[in-house]
């Protein structure tokens, strides 16, 4: 199955203005340029240059540490979480989860959407490494913050529901997982440029139906996903290329080799043009 954070980088966890209220930040020696750091990381991700992204982000992680820039460090770590997950680097992923959760608490961000971004990213990383027992409580924390601060039409709900459903599936809570996917569909149907995200949800639903023994629903899900991915209005950018590369193995798994090969070919061509 596919999680959103495999193909869509998390938002910056920087909480603007917090430094004016947290005495510990007064001893910071400086601030890293968070916006530029993340923009440069996005350039690497859009080219599928994960090695370059790793060098870049780890450099700025160390810079933030040397400056005692806790907000900047948290923002960089939140990006590193997704990177280590993609690389399968479990040891570093667990290391930065622990640090991210510590910083979120230290900076008194626990009741903010910025914190929920961290919780969701950490939960998804735990799930990716088979620790759904640790992931589920973090999804619940994310849910509590989102319900308090986000309108139900906010596109971030789509990502939450999609990822939460994956962990629920691992926990054999199939009905609850299906409802989460239905909620994600409702959100992403109305979201701007939401078709690739919506396709991901239908691919994940196909896997859920296989696991739950509802195999008669698989084909319909896959062809809905295929139609969404081939919509002429989709931006053919690095984000779209990554979605294709992550969906292709699922289509091949279910026996659609030609479709999978076409997806992989288009994904490669997009990256080469970037």
Image: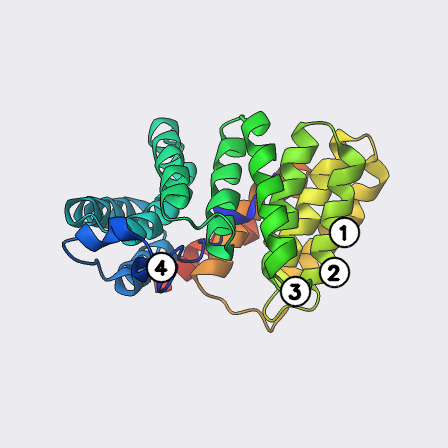
What colour-coding does the image apply? rainbow
- Are circles 3 and 4 on residues that touch, CB within 8 Å? no
Residue 12 lies left or right of residue 156; in this view the side is: left
Considering depth in this image, is 229 or 73 the residue closer to the camera? 73
Relative to 150, is 46 on the left or the right? left
Q: Tell me the residue that label 4 is attached to.
A: 18
C-alpha gap between disc 2 and disc 3: 13 Å
State the image coordinates of residue 234 (x, y, percent, origin top left).
Answer: 57, 69
Mark positioned earlier in the residue sequence (2 or 3): 3
Closer to us: 104 or 27: 27
Cα distance in 3D space between marks 3 and 4:
23 Å
Cα–Cα gap, marks 4 and 2: 34 Å
Q: Secondary structure at mark 4?
A: helix
User: To which residue does mark 2 refer?
Assistant: 186
- Where is residue 200? Give x, y as percent: 63, 51
Q: Are the residues at dot 1 and dot 2 in contact (C-beta closer than 8 Å)?
A: yes
Asked whether 74 or 79 is in front, the reply is: 74
Q: Which callout, 1 or 3, points to the residue nearer the camera?
A: 3
Q: Earlier in the sequence, mark 3 or mark 4?
A: 4
Residue 182: which disc?
1
| Tag 1–tag 3 contact (CB < 8 Å) | no
Tell me whether circle 4 and circle 2 mark residues in contact (CB < 8 Å).
no
Image position of 63 (left or right of 174): left
Q: Residue at x 16, y 50 (%)?
A: 67
Q: What kind of element bears circle 2?
A: helix
- Which secondary structure, mark 3? loop
In the picture of the structure, the residue carrying the numbered disc 3 is 151
Q: Nearer the viewer, mark 2 or mark 3?
A: 3
Compared to 203, does 112 lie above or below?
below
């Amino acid at each position: 199955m596919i999680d959103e954070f495999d193909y869509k980088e998390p938002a910056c966890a920087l909480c603007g203005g917090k430094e004016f209220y947290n005495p510990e930040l007064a001893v910071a020696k400086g601030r890293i340029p968070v916006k530029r750091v993340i923009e440069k990381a996005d350039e690497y991700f859009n080219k599928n240059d994960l090695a370059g992204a790793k060098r870049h982000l780890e450099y700025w992680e160390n810079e933030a540490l040397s400056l005692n820039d806790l907000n900047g460090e948290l923002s960089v770590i939140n990006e590193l979480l997704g990177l280590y997950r993609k690389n399968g680097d479990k040891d570093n992923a667990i290391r930065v989860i622990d640090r991210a959760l510590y910083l979120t608490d230290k900076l008194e961000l626990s009741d903010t959407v910025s914190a929920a971004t961290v919780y969701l990213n950490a939960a998804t990383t735990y799930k990716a490494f088979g620790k759904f027992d640790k992931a589920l409580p973090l999804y619940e924390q994310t849910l509590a913050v989102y319900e308090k601060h986000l309108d139900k039409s906010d596109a971030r709900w789509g990502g939450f529901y999609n990822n939460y459903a994956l962990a629920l599936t691992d926990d054999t809570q199939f009905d609850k997982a299906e409802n989460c996917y239905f909620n994600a569909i409702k959100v992403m149907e109305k979201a701007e440029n939401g078709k690739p995200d919506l396709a991901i949800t239908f691919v994940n639903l196909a896997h859920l139906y296989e696991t739950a023994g509802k195999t008669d629903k698989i084909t319909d899900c896959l062809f809905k996903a295929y139609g969404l991915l081939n919509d002429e209005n989709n931006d053919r950018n690095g984000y779209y290329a990554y979605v294709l590369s992550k969906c292709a193995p699922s289509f091949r798994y279910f026996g659609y080799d030609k479709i999978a090969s076409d997806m992989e070919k288009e994904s490669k061509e997009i990256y080469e043009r970037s």
